[in-house]
């Protein structure tokens, strides 16, 4: 549906005051910070500032879709909430490129009574619902579509709160769940205006106008921007809950980024429990500082819990998430990716044993290690196996060494490095050893959300952002921006953050398509094509195939 008149909301002082009163009155309210303390996003205790408002919406949604039992038994790859099984120390799962490995570093784990596998809220979901082992602790569209067919849309995965385009739509109809089924996207509903760590409103630097609303949720009178509990609905992929030691440790050896954002050199937020700085690499918009606060938000929103998980439940969830590693284990053509003669950086065990948060953007310390042992045919290889392995080697070298012009990337090119700026994938934004994300904490507008760079996405909401004349503008788009997802700006209220998100890890890719936070790349080939088009790289067809083969084995 396209709106005939754009809805614009710039919170007034009265509205902000009313919201502040509401946030102080609900169950998850927290003490205010000391007088004079900076009003920034973050968490107090184990609860981030936006969670009370999100909880109000989650508790207002009655999940009326019919639910069934016993679906897990029909599909042994699917982990159903409450199902009593044992997760082995090492398991592998078929995926389109071969087989995925999931390693439990602490050994076999019984799911009975474990809070990661147990429904904690009203809709019957558990954490495992959206973080399936067969998808590297993420969730693929192929798995979602299969689940719909197996359960006729009755699985808790399709809960109205965020598994449909909007809770007000007819539940159980495929069209109402189109973004989840077609792109693997869940509805992320965030309060407007944004919230500081104590839950009080942040005065934003911009207005939001809804240009088009195909999901109907941003213009919905109950769930939208003009509702009693104003929310912006954006749609994003779930990030995999694996290899988390690489996501939670601060970077080593790149001062001053052990304590500062790359974007603006402001101090990183701190873990509300330990007082230590955190990297904010867990979520696309960085709204949750730790695994613990992320688990609590997920319980209150995605699971629709009526009360906070206990400290013991949160402890067990976090401990489990810290011990899981996922990576490709077998390529269907190249063969085994671990063992004698295999590149040392591949497989889940290499992640378990690796050192997190180190820079890997140089010839000596390559991001995913050397692939030189596959450069020439080895004894016993088939011609097809040799050809694929040599393609992977070429793809790795393209990733490590092929330099191209990076230009007009907001919150990146404008940080003193130059615009344009020439780098390879490994020496640019995908430089973390073993992970391939950006080591220095920071957000950037790659062009995934903001026009004119984003892919054509008529299935997503489109917002018009108009920034205050006194606000620091978005570096290359100014103060008037069209975006499908304002990204980090929905958390900070800052104009220069519009469309910016955090880079993701590049492990276990083959089993969790589609890619990017908004699911805009249905395949790894589409991912490569996006970068080629965005930066005018000029990859040849063989180079694109080589890059895809390389990404498939990570």
Image (cartoon, grey):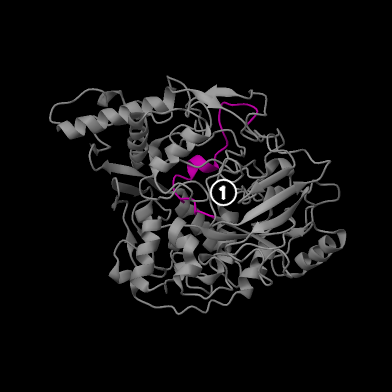
Pick the front one: 86 or 345: 345
Q: Residue furthest front?
A: 4
Pick the front one: 520 or 237: 520
* Prevailing secondary structure of the magenta residues: loop
Residue under numbered circle 1: 283
Q: Residue 548 appears in which quarter of the rendering?
A: top left
Q: Residue 19 appears in which quarter of the rendering?
A: bottom right
Residue bounds of the magenta highlight: 236-257
Q: Where 255 sits versus 337, above or below?
A: above
Could you tell me if residue 340 is visible in this image?
no
Residue at horizontal 34 percent and vertical 75 percent from the top: 70
Q: Position of residue 410 (x, y in %)?
A: 64, 35
Q: Residue 195 appears in which quarter of the rendering?
A: bottom right
Q: Position of residue 144 (x, y in %)?
A: 40, 62
Q: Position of residue 41 (x, y in %)?
A: 71, 50
Could you tell me if residue 471 is visible in this image?
yes
């Amino acid at each position: 549906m396209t709106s005939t008149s754009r809805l614009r909301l710039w919170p007034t002082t009265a509205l902000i005051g009313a919201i502040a009163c509401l946030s102080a009155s609900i169950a998850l309210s927290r003490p205010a910070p000391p007088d004079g303390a900076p009003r920034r996003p973050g968490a107090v205790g184990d609860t981030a500032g936006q969670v009370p408002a999100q909880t109000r919406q989650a508790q207002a949604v009655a999940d009326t879709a019919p639910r069934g039992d016993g679906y897990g038994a029909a599909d042994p790859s699917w982990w159903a909430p409450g199902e009593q099984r044992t997760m082995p120390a090492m398991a592998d799962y078929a995926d389109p490129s071969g087989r995925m490995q999931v390693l439990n570093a602490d050994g076999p784990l019984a799911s009975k009574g474990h809070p990661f596998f147990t429904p904690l809220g009203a809709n019957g979901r558990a954490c495992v619902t959206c973080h399936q082992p067969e998808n590297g602790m993420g969730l693929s569209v192929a798995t979602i579509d299969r689940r719909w067919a197996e359960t006729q849309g009755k699985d808790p995965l399709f809960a109205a709160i965020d598994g449909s385009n909007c809770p007000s739509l007819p539940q159980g109809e495929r069209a109402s769940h189109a973004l989840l089924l077609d792109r693997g996207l869940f509805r992320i509903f965030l309060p407007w205006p944004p919230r500081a760590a104590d839950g009080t409103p942040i005065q934003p630097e911009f207005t939001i106008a809804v240009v088009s609303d195909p999901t109907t949720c941003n213009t919905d009178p109950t769930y939208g921007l003009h509702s009693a509990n104003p929310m912006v609905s954006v749609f994003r992929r779930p990030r995999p809950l694996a290899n988390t030691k690489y996501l939670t440790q601060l970077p080593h050896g790149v001062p001053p980024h052990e304590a500062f954002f790359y974007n603006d050199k402001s101090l990183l937020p701190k873990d509300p429990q330990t007082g230590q700085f955190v990297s904010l690499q867990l979520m696309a918009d960085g709204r949750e500082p730790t695994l613990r606060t992320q688990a609590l938000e997920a319980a209150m929103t995605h699971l629709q819990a009526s009360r906070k998980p206990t400290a013991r439940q949160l402890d067990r969830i976090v401990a489990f998430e810290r011990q899981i590693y996922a990576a490709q284990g077998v390529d269907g053509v190249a063969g085994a990716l671990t063992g004698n003669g295999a590149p040392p950086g591949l497989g889940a065990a290499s992640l378990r044993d690796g050192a997190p948060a180190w820079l890997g953007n140089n010839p000596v310390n390559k991001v995913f290690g050397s692939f030189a042992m596959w450069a020439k045919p080895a004894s016993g290889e088939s011609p097809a196996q040799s050809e694929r392995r040599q393609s992977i080697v070429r793809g790795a070298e393209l990733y490590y060494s092929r330099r191209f012009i990076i230009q007009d990337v907001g919150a990146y090119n404008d940080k003193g490095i130059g615009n344009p700026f020439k780098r390879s994938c490994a020496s640019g934004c995908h430089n973390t050893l073993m992970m391939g994300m950006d080591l220095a904490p920071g957000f950037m507008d790659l062009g995934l959300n903001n026009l004119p760079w984003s892919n054509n996405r008529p299935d997503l909401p489109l917002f018009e952002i108009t920034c205050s004349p006194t606000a620091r503008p978005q570096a290359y788009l100014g103060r008037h921006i069209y975006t499908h997802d304002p990204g980090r700006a929905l958390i900070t209220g800052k104009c220069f953050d519009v469309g910016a998100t955090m880079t993701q890890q590049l492990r276990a890719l083959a089993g969790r398509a589609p890619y990017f936070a908004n699911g805009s790349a249905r395949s790894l080939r589409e991912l490569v094509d996006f970068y080629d088009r965005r930066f005018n790289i000029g990859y040849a067809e063989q180079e694109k195939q080589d890059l895809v083969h390389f990404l498939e084995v990570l």
